[in-house]
Image: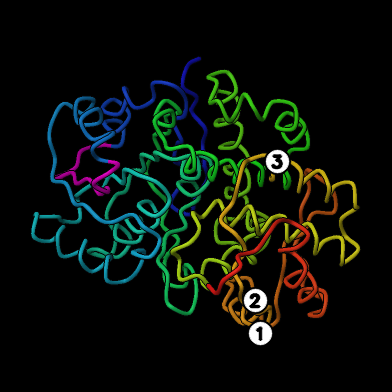
């Protein structure tokens, strides 16, 4: 299967997601189409660079300065941004430079914000190396870092010039990381593609085995879904909120456990099941769809347990969610599989019931404190 070019509309114009097996081998050709750059800089993590760096440098035909960071969610903060900006400055970055972000969602979010902030904006290319990054976080221009008060509260909308998305990079991912990323694929199916949801129900074992035919279908299809949404609503003023299905719960779980327990997709998996239950409580989601959503997500495999955190503490964390308006919580719910919408009149007692009963209904919680 040949790589596919998917266009994304942004405030700065169109950019391409060049997506498919072997896309990385064409990195030099694709980057050359963007024009000339004074210097090129890689931002990655030690682990990712060991796995991908030589292949990428060989494709580009030349070595460029490398700036490494820890890609743990707990390091997605302003201290890391400052360290990278200083490292880039010492390496001679200027306004005609290019930053290539090589890694998963944390690398892309941080490097994207660095590119947006350093010298008030330098060119950015994403080379996503995880499922989450390839189907979601590298597309749409959202960049940012966390604060102790909540996730992604400091950032910018800053579109890349190009995304090089090669599914061949996914075959070496650890199983936990791969399964975590599949949660974002399930999310896209729930909010936008009922046929893909049915495909996942029938073929999840093939997907978990990373069979080439399954991945060659799923990665481009998910890129198309994300591209269609963000092209219509780049700055999350309306439609784009549907991409946050499950994320209000997920971000609260991540914050309450100090970003140390869950991979992002694992928190999203919990969050989507909780959102399905809330949809039923609110009269938006039928019981059969709740059952299908929960069943498919549970088939991904074991998740780190729901923490022993009081529902009121999780509610407090939710109030920092970016979708909140005037202190009122907003949730993305699904009226039926393949469609989603934002709801802002959900009774708090319904949310508290879900937070209280989710660990018992969806799986065991931990037996000791968080």
Q: Position of residue 234 (x, y in %)?
A: 55, 56
Density class for disc 1 (Cα within 10 Å; few <14, some 14-19, many ≥20) is few
Q: Is mark 1 on a helix, strand or loop?
A: loop
Density class for disc 2 (Cα within 10 Å; few <14, some 14-19, many ≥20) is some
Q: Which of 269 and 150 is in front in this view?
A: 269
9 left or right, relative to 190: left
Figure check: 369 above or below 118? below
Q: Position of residue 309 (x, y in %)?
A: 61, 76
80 left or right, relative to 288: left
Residue at horizontal 67%, vertical 83%? 312
Q: Is mark 3 on a helix, strand or loop?
A: helix
Residue located beneath label 3 in the image: 189
Residue located beneath label 2 in the image: 324
Residue located beneath label 1 in the image: 327
User: Are the two marked residues, 2 and 1, in contact with CB atoms closer than 8 angstroms?
Assistant: yes
For marks 3 and 1, the one nearer the N-term is 3
* Residue stretch in magenta: 35-48
Separation of disc 2 and disc 1 at Cα?
A: 6 Å
Figure check: 236 above or below 311? above
Figure check: 83 above or below 190? below
Quadrant of residue 221 in the image?
Answer: top right
């Amino acid at each position: 299967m040949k790589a596919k070019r998917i266009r994304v509309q942004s405030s700065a114009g169109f950019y391409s997601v060049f997506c498919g097996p072997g896309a990385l081998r064409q990195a030099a050709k694709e980057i050359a189409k963007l024009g000339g750059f004074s210097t090129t800089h890689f931002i990655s993590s030690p682990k990712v660079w060991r796995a991908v760096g030589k292949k990428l440098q060989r494709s580009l035909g030349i070595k460029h300065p490398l700036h490494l960071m820890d890609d743990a969610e707990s390091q997605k903060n302003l201290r890391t941004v400052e360290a990278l900006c200083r490292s880039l400055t010492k390496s001679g970055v200027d306004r005609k430079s290019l930053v290539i972000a090589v890694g998963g969602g944390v690398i892309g979010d941080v490097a994207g914000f660095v590119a947006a902030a350093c010298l008030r904006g330098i060119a950015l290319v994403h080379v996503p190396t995880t499922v989450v990054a390839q189907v979601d976080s590298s597309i749409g221009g959202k960049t940012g870092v966390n604060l102790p008060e909540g996730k992604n509260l400091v950032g910018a909308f800053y579109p890349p010039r190009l995304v090089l998305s090669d599914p061949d990079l996914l075959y070496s991912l650890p199983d936990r990381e791969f399964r975590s990323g599949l949660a974002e694929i399930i999310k896209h199916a729930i909010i936008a593609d009922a046929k893909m949801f049915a495909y996942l129900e029938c073929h999840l074992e093939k997907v978990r085995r990373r069979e080439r035919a399954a991945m060659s279908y799923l990665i481009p299809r998910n890129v198309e879904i994300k591209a269609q949404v963000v092209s219509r609503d780049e700055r999350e003023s309306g439609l784009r909120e549907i991409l946050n299905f499950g994320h209000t719960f997920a971000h609260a779980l991540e914050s309450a456990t100090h970003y140390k327990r869950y991979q992002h997709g694992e928190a999203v998996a919990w969050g989507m099941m909780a959102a399905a239950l809330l949809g039923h409580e609110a009269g938006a989601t039928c019981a059969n769809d709740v059952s299908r959503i929960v069943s498919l997500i549970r088939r991904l495999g074991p998740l780190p347990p729901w923490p022993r955190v009081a529902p009121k503490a999780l509610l407090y964390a939710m109030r920092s969610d970016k979708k909140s308006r005037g202190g009122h919580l907003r949730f993305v719910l699904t009226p039926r599989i393949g469609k989603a919408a934002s709801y802002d009149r959900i009774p708090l007692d319904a949310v508290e019931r879900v937070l209280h009963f989710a660990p018992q209904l969806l799986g065991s919680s931990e037996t000791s404190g968080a």
